[in-house]
Amino acid sequence: MHLFWEKGYGSTSIADILKSADVNSGSLYHFFPGKQDVLVAVLEAYRDGIGEMLLNPAWEGVADPIERIFKLLDRYRHSIVETDCTYGCPIGSLALEIHEPDPIVRERLVENFTRWLDAIEGCLDAASARLPADTDRRELAQFVLTTMEGGVMLARTYRNVGHFDASVRQLKVLFERLLVSPRATTNDN
Amino acid sequence: MHLFWEKGYGSTSIADILKSADVNSGSLYHFFPGKQDVLVAVLEAYRDGIGEMLLNPAWEGVADPIERIFKLLDRYRHSIVETDCTYGCPIGSLALEIHEPDPIVRERLVENFTRWLDAIEGCLDAASARLPADTDRRELAQFVLTTMEGGVMLARTYRNVGHFDASVRQLKVLFERLLVSPRATTNDN
DNA sequence: TTCCGACTTGATTGGTCATTCAACTAATAC
DNA sequence: GTATTAGTTGAATGACCAATCAAGTCGGAA
């Protein structure tokens, strides 16, 4: 029922939801006070699924923490390609679409971002021996998110994954120049 | 008449435009076939004003090209602070908000981004002597835009400029590690 | 069997919104 | 002074949409 949010909040009518979920308006309003509460529920489901649905599949068989970061970005790349550069990170799109968000909605968006950042920071912590001692790892994790969201935006606007790739490549440059240990990242492409 | 687009396209009703511009619907439709054409006109005006309204004020009295890049980012920072972290880059917001953009609208968005990138690339070209010879300057310019848009998104969502600052700081780290000449950027903060 | 609460149905309501239109004004051309 | 044209007015139109509600269905408890 919650897999159709690539359309945006405003552009998704209740009728769309009803059709897609094959229920009637009355049933929906029996469970949700209003449209916004559906959004909140979706954001909570998304938040709780980040590990299971996003990180685990992306990181299967990948042990190196830095490699994991770029594997995750590669997963977003796949979403972009699969949707003909129409994809936008659901959270990012909503974050910019909702202009006067209710505190509850904004809080759910923040939670989603924060979980994502926690995951990346975990990778950086695991790789801390290879990073300069004075590296602010939380901040660097935020920068990875910044790069992902910005790259997705450019790829979507230009309808060209190349712009996402370029962002990731530049992030890789930063990591290469940051990492001190012998082996840098992975097979650089 | 075109200064009220910080609300988003979908959330801005024709009635809002009419009130803000103090005209009647008939007059508006005398000049514009429809709402979308108003958007296109606004995007064109924005595109044509990038130099005059954005770059020139930001770069007044700043000669160093790298410093100019961060001065421009600082200008966005001001917009964020002035709007209590409600600000979103108009182009970026529209780029993510419009989910099935008419080719004309998307083209105007692209033009806006491209002009911005041209300006940054110009700075990088001017500083090319200080950059590694193999630097892809167009790509690096794109990365600056990525950082700006991603940083704005995070600052808006978290309602906290600190996230924008963090992104800029990390970009600065990249530049510091890229620049080869004696003096790095400017007064680092 | 009866009753009860959980859940469903879908037509209806009230509101908003983009767009239209026929009537109007004013300024310029001839 | 009449005709023409550009621009204006704002009520009316029709579409869409979130939310409501009275009338149902159904399974299980007593």
Image (spheres, coloured by chain):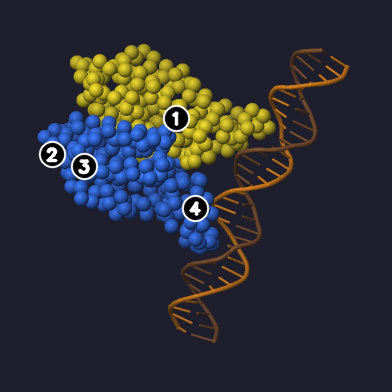
Chain colours: A yellow, B blue, C orange, D brown
Identify the mark at residue B173; answer none if there is no mark: none
**Mark toward the viewer: 3 or 4:** 3
Q: Earlier in the sequence, mark 3 or mark 4?
A: 4
> Does A163 appear above or below A188?
below
Q: Judge left or right: residue D19 versus residue D23.
A: left
What percent of the width, then of the height, locates residue A168? 30, 29
How far is disc 2 from disc 4 in space, using C-alphas?
Answer: 47 Å
**Structural crowding at the residue carrying mark 3, measured as other residues with C-alpha within 10 Å and reported as few (<14), some (14–19) or many (≥20):** some
Q: Nearer the viewer, mark 2 or mark 4?
A: 2
Question: Disc 4 designates what residue?
Answer: B35
* Placement of B186 over or under A77, stated as above or below: below
Above or below, B70 against A134 in this view is below
Q: Chain of mark 4?
A: B
Q: Position of residue A4 (x, y in %)?
A: 52, 31
Q: Amino acid at mark 3?
A: Glu
Does the rendering let one see residue A160? no
Residue at the disc numbered 3: B67
Q: Earlier in the sequence, mark 2 or mark 4?
A: 4
Q: Of the two numbered discs 3 and 2 on the same chain, state the one appearing first in sequence.
A: 3
SS state under label 4: helix
Q: Horizontal and vertical percent for residue A165?
A: 31, 31
Question: Helix or strand or loop: what does disc 2 sit on?
Answer: helix
Query: Distance of mark 1 from mark 3, alpha carbons?
Result: 32 Å
Q: Are marks 4 and 1 on the same chain?
A: no
Question: For numbered disc 3, what is the local secondary structure?
Answer: helix
Q: Give the amino acid at mark 1.
A: Val
Residue shown at the point (14%, 33%) measured from the top left? B180
Q: Which mark is residue B129?
A: 2
> Residue at left 28%, top 29%?
A171
Residue at image mark 1: A110
